[in-house]
Structures are given as C-alpha cells and as structure tokens.
Image (tube, rainbow, N blue to C red):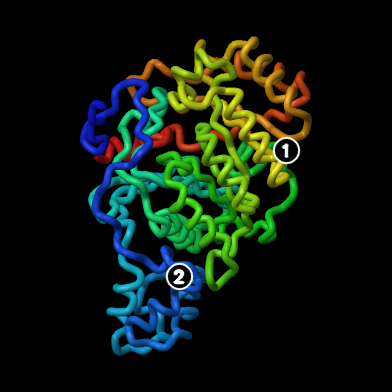
C-alpha cells in the first residue's frame, strides 16, 4: 500500500480520502476534557479538596472565564498554578473579522501545535449560533470546499471544541442587539417560529451550536461526543444547553451516523448530500465512493426513527453542476420513498472560494429547484448566508491567515 502524503504539509490528490488523522502532539489536558466524575480526582491530585471542582466548573461553564484573577472564591495562594494546570490556553486568537453590520464574527485560532482553526459566530435577533470546527483541516476532500482542499492536519480534542463555544460566550457578553435577517437561521429548523428556550436572549450567550466548521466531526467521534456531553451537561457541570439546539453535520459516514443514533442524545442530524445521484456525488463528495447516496439517506432515516428528530438535508447549489430541476425531482423522490415528515431540505447558495470553478446557482434556477422540492411535499427553505464578504466559505480565512 502506498503511504498517504502528510496532509499537514501537502494537499491531497483529487478524490483522496484521509480517514485516519495524522498523529501529532496531544493538546494539554483541560477541564473540558474531564467528565464530571473525573474532576474531583483532578483537583485532589493538586492537593485541594474535591468541592473546588464545582467552583472551577462554575467559573468556566457559567461565567465563561479561565482568568485566575476572576476566581476570587479560590485560595489566592496557588490559584494561578491551579488554573494554569487545569485550564491551559487551548485557543490563541490570531485574527477576527466581522460582517453583516457586526452580526457575523469569524475568528481564526492557533492551537498549541500551530494548527489553525476557524469558528463563526452568527448573531440573530432571537438567538446566537456558533459554527464550530472539530478538526484542523478535513480529510473528506470535497472539491468545492476550501477546508477539504487543504487536507487534514489533526483531530481536535473535546476541550478544543468546547472552548470555541466558551470563547463566543465571552464575546456575546459584551455585544448589543442585532437587526433581523432574511432566510432560515443556521442552527434553526426550517419553518421554526417558536422563541428559543432562553426567552430570546440570543445576544447574551450561544443558543445554538452547529458542527459545520472545519472537519468531519463523525471522523473525530470520541472527541465530538465528549464535547456534546460537556455542552449538554447541566450547569454548573457543563454549558447546560439543550441537545435539540445542537446540530451534527456529516457528509455521510454511515457507521458514525448509526453510532450517533445509539447514543440517545437528540441532536439534529444534518446530512450534507449535495447530489441525489451517485455519478455526480462521487465527484462532489468523495466519501460517496464508500457509502452511496441511498446508503447515506437510509442511515439518516434510521437516525430519525431512533431519535424522532427531523433530519436536515444540506444541499449546496452549484451553478450548472447540481442545480438541475431533474435532480431536485430525483432528490424529492428518494426522500419521500422513505416516508413523509421525517426530513427537511436546506438548499445553500454556494459561498465560492477564490480561483474555484464552483460558484452559486442563478437566483431563478435556485427558486425553481426549491419549488420542485416543495412540489414533492418536502419542507424546503434556502439557508441564510452569512459572511460572504469576509472569506465566508469554511476554511478560507484560515488558509488566508496561514
């Protein structure tokens, strides 16, 4: 077998999948890597009583701080050393830019080993959604995705994933209200009209998390699930978020989808399909050479059956590539063949990358595609697009920064 090139230094060849992340130095252990029952032992190891664990969790998960100076309920003597040992710096801000009158904030962070990752905070009048990364780079190699073209550097730890949400909460603490925007909010189901559980305080803390940033989270399964558990653990032991406000996106790793369904955590599944036929999807989404369209859709339907959570189908509309009316009809037929009411579709105008042949569909073509899907009785709503003027496509800003 030919050795694969090191994705941290060399781009993958077209169609090449990287299913195993390169081995690099592990990030330092962080409080957010620890399950609730592990924290008391961690504190005792440093010579402190177990009750200090709850205090540390309150600072990190409720007050969203890792600043030792703010933790005045901890003994001053040794406080700095304690926090440095249990909450080492994981994400070092490198660059942050805004768009949409300040409602969208895209950030690039440097990890302990120099790898760069992105997150995007999108503020809406009723909620605040963060699009987080789960890997530095991505091994799925989709040709229209900036991240996929850079290859996979390494998996992120559970704490590195969670820390993106905590960092966003710090930003939101200082943020003011935002104006309304069109389209369906990322992290909200199509047609969703009810107010969020926090009563609309979307400008004060993250209400929704979507695993749609850099990486394929189901290829970094253990860390992704660990991060989800930290997010959904009740405060002060975790961020206290509802699992229903979390969305796990996947290009269609069938075993991972089935494994997620068995976890008993009712997160929303978003299947990034992008084509209803194997011939085209083999080209657009190389994982399709392993798990075909019907296998991916079947796995998504099993997820619905196991969780009762309606599945999202994400479909990036690419001009003259996958936006034909007959493909909308084929997609509608495949989904309705499994049943009614289990799925909704989010066509997404493609955010093009510089120099790419891929670009967004014409507005009239997009509308026709949507109407054909609705004619099959499938709820279909075009996603709100954010950050098109700030290297909005996933991976662009990190690549430009590097």
Q: Can residue 163 be seen in this view?
A: yes
Q: Mark 1 points at which residue?
A: 191
For marks 1 and 2, the one nearer the N-term is: 2
Q: In this view, does 325 lie above or below 92?
A: above
State the separation of the CA atoms marked 1 and 2: 34 Å
- Residue 295 percent across, percent down from the top left: 59, 27
Quadrant placement of the N terminus: top left
Q: In this view, does 323 lie above or below 117?
A: above
Label 1 sits on a secondary structure element that is loop
Query: Who is closer to the viewer here, 238 or 296?
Result: 296
Q: Name the residue under label 2.
A: 60
Q: Residue at the location (55% across, 27% down)? A: 273
Q: Residue at the location (47% across, 26% down)? A: 290
- Residue 96 percent across, percent down from the top left: 36, 48
Label 2 sits on a secondary structure element that is helix
- Residue 201 percent across, percent down from the top left: 62, 59
């Amino acid at each position: 077998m030919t050795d694969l090139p090191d994705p941290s230094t060399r781009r993958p060849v077209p169609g090449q999948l990287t299913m195993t992340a390169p081995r690099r130095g592990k990030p330092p252990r962080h409080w957010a890597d620890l399950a609730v029952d592990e924290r008391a032992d961690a504190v005792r190891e440093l010579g402190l009583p177990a009750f200090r664990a709850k205090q540390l969790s309150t600072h990190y998960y409720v007050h969203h701080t890792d600043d030792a100076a703010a933790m005045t309920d901890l003994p001053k003597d040794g406080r700095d050393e304690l926090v440095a040992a249990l909450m080492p710096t994981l994400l070092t801000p490198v660059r942050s830019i805004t768009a949409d009158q300040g409602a969208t904030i895209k950030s690039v962070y440097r990890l302990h080993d120099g790898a760069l990752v992105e997150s995007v905070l999108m503020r809406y009048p009723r909620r605040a959604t963060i699009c987080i990364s789960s890997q530095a780079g991505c091994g799925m190699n989709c040709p229209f995705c900036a991240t996929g073209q850079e290859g996979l550097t390494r998996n992120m730890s559970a704490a590195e994933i969670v820390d993106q949400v905590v960092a966003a909460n710090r930003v939101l603490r200082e943020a003011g209200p935002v104006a309304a925007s069109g389209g369906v909010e990322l992290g909200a189901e199509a047609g969703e009209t009810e107010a969020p559980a926090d009563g609309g305080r979307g400008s004060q803390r993250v209400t929704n998390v979507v695993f749609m940033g850099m990486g394929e989270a189901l290829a970094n399964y253990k860390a992704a699930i660990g991060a989800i558990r930290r997010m959904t653990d009740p405060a002060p032991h975790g961020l206290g978020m509802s699992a229903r406000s979390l969305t796990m996106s996947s290009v269609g790793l069938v075993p991972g989808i089935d494994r997620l369904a068995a976890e008993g955590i009712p997160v929303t599944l978003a299947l990034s399909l992008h084509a209803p036929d194997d011939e085209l999807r083999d080209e657009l989404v190389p994982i399709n050479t392993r798990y075909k369209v019907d296998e991916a859709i079947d796995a998504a339907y099993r997820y619905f059956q196991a969780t009762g959570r309606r599945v999202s189908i994400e479909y990036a509309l690419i001009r003259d590539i996958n936006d034909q009316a007959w493909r909308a009809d084929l997609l509608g037929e495949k989904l309705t063949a499994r049943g009614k009411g289990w799925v909704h579709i989010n066509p997404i105008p493609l955010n093009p990358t510089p120099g790419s042949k891929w670009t967004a569909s014409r507005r009239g073509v997009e509308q026709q595609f949507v109407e054909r899907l609705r004619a099959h009785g499938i709820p279909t709503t075009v996603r709100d697009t954010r950050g098109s003027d700030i290297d909005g496509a996933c991976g662009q800003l990190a690549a430009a920064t590097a």
